[in-house]
Amino acid sequence: MVTLSLDAASVRLGRRLVVDAVSATLGAGTLVGIIGPNGAGKSSLLRAMLGLVPLASGSVTLDGESVSAMARGAIARKLAYLPQGQLLHWPLTVERLVALGRLPHLAPMSAMSPADIDAVERAIERADVAGLRGRVATELSGGERARALLARTLAVEAPALLADEPLASLDPGHQIDVMALLRREARAGALVVTVLHDLTMAARYCDRLLLMDRGVLVADGAPLDVLTAERLRRVYGISAMIDPPMIVPVARSLEPL
Amino acid sequence: MVTIASRLVPPRSMLVAGLIALILLAATASLMLGAVSLAPARIFAALAGRGDPIATAILFDLRMPRTILGLVVGAMLGLAGAALQGYLRNPLAEPSVLGASNAAALGAVCAIYFGLAELHPVMLPLLAILTGLGALALLFALAGRSESPLTLILAGIAVATLASAAISLSLNLSPNPFAAMEIMAWLMGSIENRSFHHVWVALPCIAVGAALLLADGRALDALTLGEDGARALGADLRVTRLRLLLGVAIGVGGAVAVSGSIGFVGLIVPHLIRPLTDRSPSAILLPSALGGAALLTLADIGVRLIPSNVELKLGVVTAFLGVPVFLVYLMRERRLW
């Protein structure tokens, strides 16, 4: 069980304020979606939660402890992170890749314990990559690789999972698989936070949405309360057909913002 | 459970055992072979202190330091190459990429140029190590606190270029052709005619450098997922980078200080080792050190056995060895083989 709290957290990249005084408290057992147009500060917000970017002001606390004061290893055992872009530099097998998720738990100079191996097994099971375990991860299709990297994240067995655009470049079937998987993790008691672009997926699967616009958190609540036609027009500059749970962008809004 | 355990922990013990056997073979051959070949019985007698004076002199004054240097210099170059390829996530990285080898070579060249090398046999390696550390300080000043591998490579190229320009300057200004020849010969790389003085200078540096690099294994594995991915897995990349730079500067500086610039070992050994492992950066560190030790020792035996009027330089032989390895690599990339 974990609680992640942001209190007026701001992030500055260069001279630009990319996250502007965002406050929110995220609790265990919820699937939280972070949405907003490109450049709204979604990824930066996620990285701030992980302590990967320094805060310009405000604070991020994890179970009452300031993330910026925590050791990287301690954060790593509580927050599992799936970075954007399916980055993988060496041609590891899926099994070896998933085992990287156990790095935060390994004692210095020691090999994986039976408990670590069990955790890898469970992650492979949960992400449904058992059939790929011997394959080289860099040679997989985009959808397969996404699942393998997700399994790597699950292998951490952290109480919270933060995923940056896990649906990017996936076909609709794989998108549903990934969202269903994230929801299962949340139902099992984890805090799951994910950056999303697909509004229908966000509305269908998330328990709560944070809508970002130019660094500011402009709406926070249940998906259908956040995704109103008025907000979509104002934030994304689109007119959308809203037929819950379907949110279909139909045109660039031509009205002045 | 058993299957996954055995596959997750690759049969590294087999690989390591095989490489150690290869090293023992190479080292024994290196003690035996040369202008005068020594039978194992004479070597054992000399080791036990009961040998004939000629065998004892050859063994302790010539072959032993040469063999030890071949092993430790090769191990350091192989390890540094493996660690740098892992850290920079670039299979073309090698020990000279951060300027450490060029800077150490510059120190040695200065020792020859200003005649300091004639004062005492350890003057040259000491000066080489000092300039290697000076280059490291310059590298830190240039690369700053940035964690990006690109900044580090650019800073490394700047340092390496500066050092090699200074080396060229010394050749340019050298008072007579003999001084220039001496510098050139040293730059080509060799472990011929080294004494235990050289071993005692190189060994501590290489031990410290190797320990620093081996300690980075897990962080290098984590970097497979990129910098954010690594940090989110608990890696402190500033510590990783500090250990890596110090390890390369001290270890490679120490190695170059006694052997001159021996290229390609650090580049090709990780490529030869990687297919025999699970390809994660940590898994190739120790085997690359062992493989480098074996390869350089074998190349040094080759130097002694290839018939030629002048003894070939070790760095020349390793450079020729590097070419076929890269052709194979290229052909695999182009899927011709």
Image (spheres, rainbow, N blue to C red):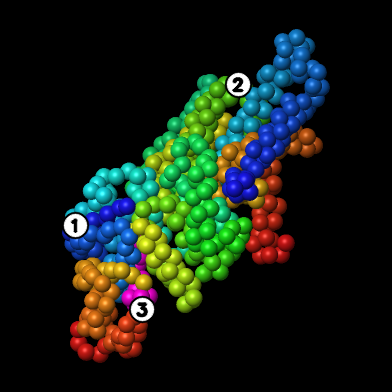
Q: Quick one: SS at disc 2? A: helix
Q: Where A104 sits versus A220, above or below?
A: above
Q: Where A225 sits versus B222, above or below?
A: below
Q: Is residue B191 left or right of residue A200?
A: right
Mark 2–mark 3 distance (CA, rounded to whole Å): 73 Å
**In this rendering, which labeled residue sits more in front, label 3 or label 1?**
3
Measuring 44% from the left and 65% from the top, which residue is drawn there? A181
Q: Position of residue B315 (x, y in %)?
A: 64, 40
Q: Quick one: SS at disc 3? A: helix
Q: Position of residue A88 (x, y in %)?
A: 50, 59
Say which residue label 3 marks.
A200
Mark 1 on the same chain as mark 2: no
Mark 3–mark 1 distance (CA, rounded to whole Å): 29 Å
Residue type pointed to by label 3: Thr
- Disc 2 chain ID: B
Say which residue label 1 marks.
A7
Q: Position of residue A132 (x, y in %)?
A: 59, 61
Queried whether the magenta region covers residue A199, the answer comes back as yes
